[in-house]
Image (cartoon, rainbow, N blue to C red):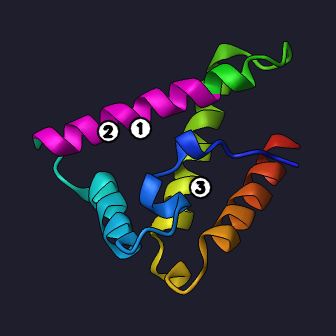
Amino acid sequence: MIHIHPHFLPTGFVHQHPSVDNGRVYLREMVFGDPTEPHHHEALTITGQTEQAVAAVLRRDARVGEADAATTARVVSAVMFLAMAASVNVAASADEILRDIRAQIAVLLTR
């Protein structure tokens, strides 16, 4: 089973905070907003740090090179963003979305 550490997910998402819809709007803004806006830039910096952390975990496997780990980490980040921000998942619980993320990442990591 794939473990997604809560550190990699927005706090409101993991805890089903009442403002989970605001979290989805925030995630969409991170992807499509103005990267020169200070708060957006800070969020993108955190995203980059998260991708570096995921890549570091992937590199624990001696068969995974640095470039592949970085690329895979970006794909993992994209999977997480889409699963958490997509309007199609608006009625899904955090647990359902986490299961979906795990399933997608499992397919990615078996390649």
- Judge left or right: residue 83 versus residue 102: left
Q: Earlier in the sequence, mark 1 or mark 3?
A: 1
Q: Quadrant of the rendered structure where residue 21 is? A: bottom left
Q: Earlier in the sequence, mark 2 or mark 3?
A: 2
Q: Quadrant of the rendered structure where residue 64 is? A: top right
The range drawn in magenta is 38-54
Reading the image, the residue beneath label 1 is 47
Which amino acid type corresponds to the residue marked 3 in the rendered image? Val
CA–CA distance between discs 1 and 3? 13 Å
User: Which residue corresponds to the image point at 45% horizontal and 52% vertical from the top-left?
Assistant: 10
User: Which residue corresponds to the image point at 45% horizontal and 80% vertical from the top-left?
Assistant: 87
Q: Residue 74's x, y, as percent? A: 55, 38
In the image, residue 55 above or below residue 44: above
- Judge left or right: residue 66 versus residue 39: right
Report the magenta stretch's main SS: helix
Evaluate whether residue 6 shows in this view: yes
The answer to which of 32 and 103 lies nearer the viewer is: 103
Which amino acid type corresponds to the residue marked 2 in the rendered image? Leu
Q: Residue 31's x, y, as percent? A: 34, 54
The answer to which of 63 and 4 lies nearer the viewer is: 4
Reading the image, the residue beneath label 2 is 44
Reading the image, the residue beneath label 3 is 79
